[in-house]
Image (cartoon, rainbow, N blue to C red):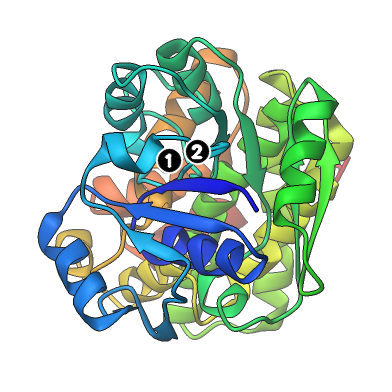
């Protein structure tokens, strides 16, 4: 049995804590909001983010970060992308550390860095990235799922693979950290666009075309930024894109659907409890594409809808009216 520190008590952090407890480990669950932690401890259920899933006895809700980290063999970062640097700074100041695992997805605004880079800069070590198509609502209920543990040092990735693998969660390893992270982050932007298609009442033809061209867009930018092309056709790319763009559980698809129906972004986000990472990632991806001279037509139109008031029907028409060209 290992002691695992899980930092972030949202739906995915709670799910990972429950999963690891079920695998025979002690999971210490910490979050930034003491009121939420108090409710978790009282109810032994995350009614705010993951209702219906009870916390096993081996999930310890811990309000003090130092006690959460004490003696832990692994530290999982499962906080929103824009909070990763702040939380990692607190961990770095706490003393001895365990193997860090980045289970958050997204890009940091301002620096435009991948989250594993943020952790490396803050902690002084390379984390393992845990990513792939994995809705908390399904993993927490034991629905069969496969994900990826990515690290340049494959032995570190294998340690996380062994830690997390169970009969219902299969973990593969990958050494292309950049490709896995860019695939996982950028797919959220395309998932927003997929939701817009749903909000506009379009069908399978449109969704199929969008996902195919969206994957090409993700791979184009990801390769320019150092990822390997084949990674984007694996679990962290195509797999995560399909799950996020199609699922009723997807926050990003949900945002897009409501925008597609004509709701302003501020209203949509104001009514949500959880974070839709694709909104911030869209800004970061657009900046990266422009900086590296990579054409991102879908991302550009998503940003135009979210931040510049472009009507969804106009955004679609802008995509359909682009110059004709070869698919390849």
The quarter of the rendered structure image containing the C terminus is top right
Return the x and y of residue 42 as percentages of the image width and height: 19, 78
The residue located at (31%, 79%) in the rendering is: 44
What residue is shown with label 2?
72
Above or below — where is 270 with respect to 297?
A: below
Looking at the image, is mark 2 or mark 1 nearer the viewer?
2
Residue extending farthest to the left is 35
Q: Is mark 2 on a helix, strand or loop?
A: loop
Splitting the image into 4 quarters, where does residue 118 fall?
A: top left
Return the x and y of residue 181 as percentages of the image width and height: 63, 36
Q: Is mark 1 on a helix, strand or loop?
A: helix
In the depicted view, which residue is nearer to us: 116 or 223? 116
In screen coordinates, is 54 left or right of 177? left
Query: Is residue 324 at least partly visible in the picture?
Result: no
The residue located at (52%, 19%) in the rendering is: 117
Return the x and y of residue 186 as percentages of the image width and height: 57, 43
The residue located at (48%, 56%) in the rendering is: 27
In screen coordinates, is 316 left or right of 237? left
**Label 2 crowding class (10 Å Cα cut-off): few <14, some 14-19, many 20+?**
many
Return the x and y of residue 265 as percentages of the image width and height: 22, 60
In the depicted view, which residue is nearer to us: 58 or 92? 58
Above or below — where is 194 with respect to 6?
A: below
The residue located at (78%, 53%) in the rendering is: 235
What residue is shown with label 1?
281
**Label 1 crowding class (10 Å Cα cut-off): few <14, some 14-19, many 20+?**
many
In the depicted view, which residue is nearer to us: 238 or 48? 48
Above or below — where is 311 with respect to 258?
A: above
């Amino acid at each position: 049995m290992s002691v695992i520190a899980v930092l972030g008590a949202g739906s995915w952090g709670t799910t990972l804590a429950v999963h690891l407890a079920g695998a025979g480990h002690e999971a210490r669950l910490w979050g930034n909001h003491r009121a939420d932690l108090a409710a978790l401890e009282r109810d032994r259920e995350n009614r705010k983010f993951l209702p219906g899933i009870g916390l096993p006895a081996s999930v310890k809700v811990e309000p003090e970060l130092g006690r959460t980290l004490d003696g832990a063999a692994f530290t999982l970062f499962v906080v929103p992308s824009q909070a990763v640097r702040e939380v990692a700074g607190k961990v770095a100041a706490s003393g001895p550390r365990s193997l860090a695992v980045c289970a958050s997805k997204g890009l940091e605004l301002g620096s435009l860095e991948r989250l594993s880079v943020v952790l490396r800069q803050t902690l002084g070590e390379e984390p393992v990235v845990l990513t792939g198509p994995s809705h908390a609502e399904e993993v927490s209920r034991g629905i069969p799922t496969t994900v990826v543990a990515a690290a340049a040092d494959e032995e570190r990735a294998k340690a996380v693979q062994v830690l997390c693998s169970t009969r219902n969660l299969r973990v593969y390893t990958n050494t292309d950290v950049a490709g896995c992270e860019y695939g996982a982050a950028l797919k959220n932007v395309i998932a927003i666009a997929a939701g817009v298609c749903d909000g506009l009442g379009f069908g399978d033809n449109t969704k199929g075309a969008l996902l195919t061209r969206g994957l090409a867009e993700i791979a184009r930018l990801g390769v320019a930024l150092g990822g390997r092309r084949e990674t984007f056709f694996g679990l962290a790319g195509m797999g995560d894109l399909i799950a996020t763009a199609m699922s009723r559980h997807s926050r990003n698809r949900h945002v897009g659907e409501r925008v597609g129906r004509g709701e302003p972004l501020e209203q949509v986000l104001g009514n949500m409890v959880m974070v839709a990472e694709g909104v911030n990632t869209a800004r970061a991806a657009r900046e990266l594409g422009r900086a590296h001279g990579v054409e991102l037509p879908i991302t550009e139109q998503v940003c135009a809808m979210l931040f510049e008031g472009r009507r969804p029907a106009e955004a679609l028409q802008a995509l359909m009216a682009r110059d004709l060209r070869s698919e390849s």
